[in-house]
Image (spheres, rainbow, N blue to C red):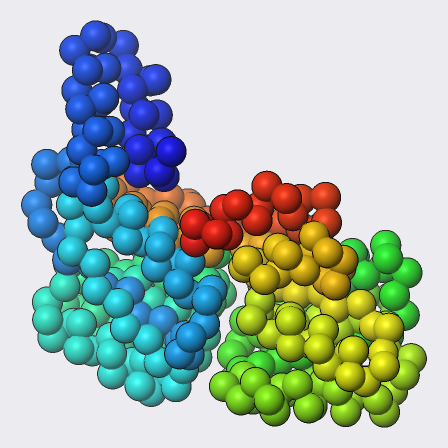
Amino acid sequence: MSAALAAVLGVTLAGCSSTGGKRAEERAAQAAQGHAAVNTPRWTFAMVTHSGDGDTFWDIVQSGAKQAAVKDNIKFLYAHDVEGNKQAQDVQAMIDQKVDGLIVTLAKPDAMKDVVARARQAGIPVVTVNSGSEESKKFGALTHIGQDETIAGEAVGDELNQRGKKKAVCVLHEQGNVGHEQRCAGVKKTFKGELENLYVEGTNMPGVLSTIQAKLQSEQDIDAVVTLGAPFAPTAVKAAEQAGSKAEIDTFDLNAKVAQGLKDGSLGFAVDQQPYLQGYEAVDLLWLYKYNADVLGGGRPVLTGPQIITKDDAGPLAEYTKRGTR
């Protein structure tokens, strides 16, 4: 059952009259066939993120956003750039196109502050996702959807403690990303062992491999490596193998390879922030605001994580990762 169909069927279950139920079923059928389930205007929403090329995490975010856009009769636009200034330029381009709503990430908040203000001045409502929960309200966004990065990091530290780890490395693959810094700081806050940050260039995967391998070879007492993105987990596993290290590899985020790694035991655990939900809810909340002036969160972020995923959870989730929703 598609997410769009499930969402509209929820209306069916809540309906009181046979007429209302029948109409809800008709809307559900339309959504399932790729048609809008509402009769609101054809608004245009744009999402602009800090993603680099080939990052599967953002494919999942887009999957959720696109399904919600179909349901809500929205034309959906997407742009991304890992450089903060270029991301801001992409946002300005969307403002110039006079989009009806904006979804942005604030991984580089200093670069994004002015352009978010210009969107507000132009009367364009803004929802932030994934990164920048602390800056979102300050910048005037309607709400922020994602996980609290510090809380997510603290959950990792607690999990490492339960697993008896003593010395860990937190691998940051994007320098200047405030969310990444918050994750590692959260781990350090609750982890009772020794934690060191290791900076790598995320766009150069061979370099990531060699840097982690060298670290593990030079410090054989490292017993845990935490990567901050699913695409880097298999690389860390390979680095540990080549270094002759027995360090457990754990990661933030989930994709098909991570689900398989959890299943076969090459990965210890993953922290899922449900990116599909971030994209889906961002579009839905903008639609609700445009249609009915609704705002969720009460001034606080709408949390989609963290959820600790282990081998016991991997089986069912593997099926969801194949369809691009987890």
**Horizontal placement of 141 versus 256: left or right?**
left
**Horizontal placement of 207 versus 31: left or right?**
right
List x then y, in percent, for residue 250.
71, 65
> In terms of image quadrants, where is residue 140?
bottom left
Residue pictured at 38% horizontal, 33% vertical: 1
> In terms of image quadrants, where is residue 182?
bottom right
Residue pictured at 62% horizontal, 80% vertical: 172
> In terms of image quadrants, where is residue 119?
bottom left
Residue pictured at 84% horizontal, 89% vertical: 217
List x then y, in percent, for residue 70.
21, 46
Q: Please say whether residue 296 is visible from this viewpoint.
A: yes
**Horizontal placement of 225 versus 14: left or right?**
right
Q: Nearer the viewer, residue 189 or 167?
A: 167
Q: How many marks?
A: 0
- Rendered view: 40 above or below 111: above
List x then y, in percent, for residue 12.
29, 19
**Horizontal placement of 60 versus 47: left or right?**
right
List x then y, in percent, for residue 43.
12, 53
Q: Nearer the viewer, residue 241 or 11?
A: 241
- Rendered view: 218 above or below 125: below
Q: Nearer the viewer, residue 47 or 127?
A: 47
Residue pictured at 31% horizontal, 33% vertical: 5
Q: Please say whether residue 270 is visible from this viewpoint.
A: no
